[in-house]
Image: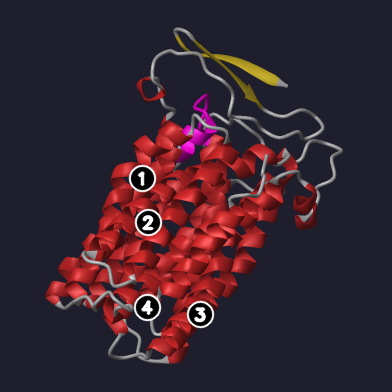
Amino acid sequence: MGVLAMVGPSTTCIIVHGDPHGNPVLSSTPFRRGAPWWLQNCPRELIWCCMMRGLAMMPLTGMGFYLGIAYGDRISAMALGYGFAVAAALGIASRWLAGRSLDGGCHWYHLLASSGLLTGMSMVQLRDISSWPALLLGMGMQGLGLGLFWPAVEMAVAHTRGTVPLSKAFTLARLFEAAGSALGVLGTVPFTGAGHYSWAFLAAAALLFGLAGAALLSPSIVGGCQSLKTSQPPGQPAGSYWSLVKIQGLPAVMLISIMATTVIILQQSALPLDLVRGSLGRPELEPVVGNLVLAIQLVLLLVMQFPVGLLASRWPAMVGLRWSLRIFAGGQAAMALSCLPIPQNLWLVVAAQVLTALGTAIFLPVASTACLERTPIPLQGRALAAYSECWGISSIVAPPAAGWLLEHQSHGLGLWLLLTALCLATSCLNPG
């Protein structure tokens, strides 16, 4: 059944809620020229949802980088690595649970509130640790909370967007995420300067407990606009995760997402190692210079996310996914060239950060949109959980594999060339 909505003076769109057979929700419909969408009334439920995403990213991203700084002299790097692995493993289990719960009729704000409580308690646990069991407990609670968070918060955007096109709603959500991440990383600086590491964890816990309260006070709970339903229609079989494999184009979207998230995650693990160690013709960088180079990508993503996301929302989702991979390939190729004895090769590193930020700004909103557009309504919660698992798979597999290459080759040329080839090959997939 379709709902005809007049969005602007000369703009007409069709919002498809799905038919009794559970056909996909469509959002990439053609629009006639009219008032820009951001000048129209954006639902307050969507704004609230985006603010919650930004609020969550402040402690989650900030403290993710802060763990190594706070406990680098107390706990070994191997123990911290195992802690992150435990969090990722438990996150896999809770993501599957979140997907089934969403498709079974559980409201997204219940999952968000549970996530805020779990991750908040993990910050309280991590505020002062000196042993492996204490770290294990804290990281385990954090992994469970993050697994509930991502499918729920993605579904929240679809539920609260009203007549705003799905791809543009996700663009707005990613903008708030980027701002929250930047503020979270910067917000740890005063605590480091004062030497009060535990205060940073307690501040993060307060923000996450605030997230739980904000989820339960969401305007969409009472009188909120619901642009699509996720529970199965009466008489419809609920389906399973294996049913996702049969959905046309969705496996290709997942493979593309694994490749793209691999590139994004390696910017936090392999790239810093390659910069501080040097590579073939590129000299070693001072840690301060390396930090500045890495900050370029974060700042550019914050600046690019909204305008680039709006541009990508005009394209079919598969076009955006392909272009993001091609741009990622260009960034990794620039990194490979920077390894060679070329004059001013540091500028190639900077160019790689620009291209990677551009590819990320395209990929993040488009991937979520592509999952929902291709998935029947009764399986959309599971589809978002599976998309979230792409990040988990990349987090577990990519850093150790990249570390092995860097250690055995003593330079990053092979790693960046491999990523370039894989990005180009994956861009040939057809998720249409």
Verify whether residue 320 appears in magenta: no
Quadrant in the picture for the N terminus: top right
Residue at (60% x, 56% y) in the render: 425
Q: Residues within 10 Å of mark 4 (few under 14, many from 20)?
A: many
Residue 404 percent coordinates (x, y): 49, 83
**Label 3 to label 2, Cα distance in Å?**
25 Å
Closer to us: mark 4 or mark 2? 2
Q: Element at badge 4?
A: helix
- Left or right: residue 144 versus residue 215 is right
Residue 263 percent coordinates (x, y): 47, 62
Residue 416 percent coordinates (x, y): 44, 68
Identity of the amino acid at label 2?
A: Met
Residue at which label 1 appears: 176
Identity of the amino acid at label 4?
A: Leu
Labelled pair 3, 2 in contact (Cβ < 8 Å): no
Residue at (38% x, 87% y) in the render: 77
Viewer can see residue 6: yes
Location of residue 237 by image quarter? top right
Residue at which label 2 appears: 57
**Label 4 to label 3, Cα distance in Å?**
24 Å
For marks 1 and 3, the one nearer the N-term is 1
- Left or right: residue 182 versus residue 213 is left
Closer-to-camera residue (378/260): 260
Q: Residues within 10 Å of mark 3 (few under 14, many from 20)?
A: few
Closer-to-camera residue (236/125): 236
**Label 4 to label 2, Cα distance in Å?**
17 Å
Q: Element at badge 1?
A: helix
Q: Is residue 263 above or below residue 174?
A: below
Residue at which label 4 appears: 126
For marks 4 and 1, the one nearer the N-term is 4
For the magenta stretch, what is the residue range? Answer: 160-170
Quadrant in the picture for the C terminus: top right
